[in-house]
Image (cartoon, rainbow, N blue to C red):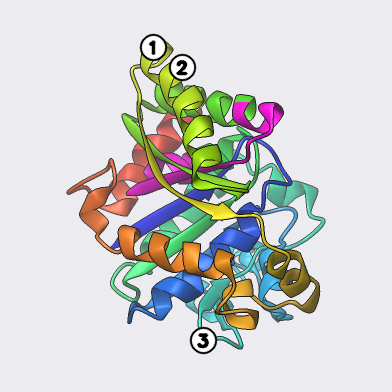
């Protein structure tokens, strides 16, 4: 199973919009795709897909609903496991409930070809646990210095706390490919010098008015504006991410990786 974590050190970099668009792009290649909203206490993914789910991960964690029954189908066909907005307890899971959630996620193995995990921004325990367990970790940044600094901080935690050996960088809101290359080279140099971490530039998404316009309508921009430049960028990215062997965690089940990552923060 190809598990892709989309994470970032800073909010406001377009992570959730990119995750929803990538899910649609991967589904269009023929993959069975599930999106997990792992930003547990804020839950923006239901807005991205314009759905009002009857159940959420809160019900799964409480034990009132099986995880399969909490999954909803979005209007564009992608399956979504939604979180719950405004829940302090959900955003701050203790070790027991975090492990229960991770075990429930493992039961989905075999039902999907690709799982995209939209983590919360920052270096919280739940976000980093999910990211460290993924077969492909994508850190989203922009060209802003604060965003690049926070992306590096995220990589530092993944490397030093979770022993992650490689991550992939996605640069959003750029004017040109050269802008993305500059951001990548800045972060990659620091990661190689101070973290011994392999960083690969997996792609970039150009600044595009189609993205905020689609977000306001509750439609992934690759659906609302399929011919927009940003949509083309995500189609290219989807082709690069189809192979589950391309990530840094190879040949190990998602559950075993989750269990190992959870032990780090316990």
In the figure, is residue 113 to the left or right of 201? left
Q: Are the residues at dot 2 and dot 1 in contact (C-beta closer than 8 Å)?
A: yes
| Label 2 vs 3, first from the N-terminus | 3
Task: From the viewer's side, name the closer residue of 236 and 159.
Answer: 236
Residue 65 in sight? no
Where residue 93 sits, quadrant-wise, is: top right
| Residue 237 lies in the magenta-colored region | no
Q: CA distance from mark 2 to mark 1?
A: 5 Å
- Please tell me whether mark 1 sits on a helix, a strand or a loop: helix
Q: Position of residue 235 (x, y in %)?
A: 43, 68
Residue 84 in sight? yes
Q: Which residue sits at x=51%, y=78%?
A: 79
Q: Position of residue 10 (x, y in %)?
A: 68, 37
Q: Position of residue 232 (x, y in %)?
A: 49, 68
Q: Which residue sits at x=72%, y=74%?
A: 214
Q: CA distance from mark 3 to mark 1?
A: 43 Å
Residue at which label 2 appears: 190
Task: Give the vertical position of 52 relative to 178 (above or below).
Answer: below
Q: Which mark is residue 77?
A: 3
Q: Which residue sits at x=21%, y=47%?
A: 252
Task: From the viewer's side, name the closer residue of 210 and 28.
Answer: 210
Task: From the viewer's side, name the closer residue of 150 and 132.
Answer: 150
Tell me the magenta residue range.
129-148
Where residue 263 sits, quadrant-wise, is: top left
Q: Position of residue 133 (x, y in %)?
A: 38, 44
Residue at which label 1 appears: 193
- Please tell me whether mark 3 sits on a helix, a strand or a loop: loop
In the figure, is residue 141 to the left or right of 247? right
Q: How many marks?
A: 3
């Amino acid at each position: 199973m190809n598990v892709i974590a989309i994470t970032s050190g800073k909010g406001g970099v377009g992570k959730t919009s990119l995750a929803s668009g990538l899910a649609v792009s991967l589904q269009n290649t023929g993959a069975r795709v599930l999106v997990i909203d792992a930003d547990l206490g804020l839950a923006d993914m239901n807005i991205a897909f314009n759905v009002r789910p009857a159940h959420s991960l809160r019900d799964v964690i409480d034990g009132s609903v099986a995880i399969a029954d909490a999954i909803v189908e979005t209007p564009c066909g992608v399956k979504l496991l939604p979180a719950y907005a405004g829940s302090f307890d959900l955003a701050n899971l203790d070790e027991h409930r975090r492990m229960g959630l991770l075990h429930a996620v493992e039961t989905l193995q075999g039902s999907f070809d690709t799982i995209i995990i939209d983590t919360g921004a920052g270096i919280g325990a739940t976000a980093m646990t999910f990211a460290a367990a993924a077969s492909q970790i994508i850190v989203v940044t922009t060209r802003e210095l604060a965003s690049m600094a926070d992306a590096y901080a995220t990589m530092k935690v993944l490397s030093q706390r979770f022993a992650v050996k490689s991550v992939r960088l996605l640069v959003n809101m750029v004017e040109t490919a050269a802008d993305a290359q500059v951001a990548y080279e800045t972060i990659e140099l620091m990661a190689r010098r101070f973290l011994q971490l392999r960083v690969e530039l997996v792609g970039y998404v150009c600044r595009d008015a189609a993205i905020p316009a689609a977000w306001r309508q509750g439609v992934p921009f690759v659906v609302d504006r399929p011919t927009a430049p940003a949509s083309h960028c995500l189609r290219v990215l989807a082709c690069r991410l189809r192979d589950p062997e391309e990530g840094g965690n190879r040949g190990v089940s998602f559950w075993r990786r989750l269990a190992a990552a959870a032990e780090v923060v316990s």
